[in-house]
Image (cartoon, rainbow, N blue to C red):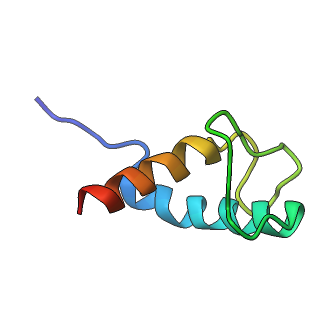
Amino acid sequence: MRLRVIDPECAHRPRGIGAATGWLRETGNGALRVPYTVITPEDWRTVGGGYPLGQWIAEQRHANRAG
């Protein structure tokens, strides 16, 4: 059986950081308090629209707490 990774985990980190940077720039929210349901708008060309920013932030915080 051969498997192919279509969207590798390493691709999520730069997109997540870019989306978080865009969120800070757009909202001025310095604490990066992003609701879990936030998905990037279609007009955010730097990361592309439809990125699940709120979910990504929650996963990063969970991973950080887990060590």
Report the quarter where the N terminus lies.
top left
In this rendering, the answer to whether 57 lies above or below 6 is: below
Residue 19 lies in what quarter of the image?
A: bottom right
Give the left or right position of residue 37, taking residue 45 as reference. left
Report the quarter where the C terminus lies.
bottom left
> How many numbered discs?
0
For the point 81% across and 58% down, the residue is 45
Q: Residue furthest left?
A: 1
In this rendering, the answer to whether 24 lies above or below 48 is: below
Residue 31 placement (x, y as % from top left): 68, 66
Q: In front here: 15 or 25?
A: 25
For the point 43% across and 56% down, the residue is 60
Q: In front here: 23 or 64?
A: 64
Give the left or right position of residue 10, taking residue 3 as reference. right
Residue 22 placement (x, y as % from top left): 77, 64
Residue 43 placement (x, y as % from top left): 89, 50
In this rendering, the answer to whether 51 lies above or below 11 is: above
For the point 59% across and 60% down, the residue is 15
Q: In front here: 22 or 3?
A: 22
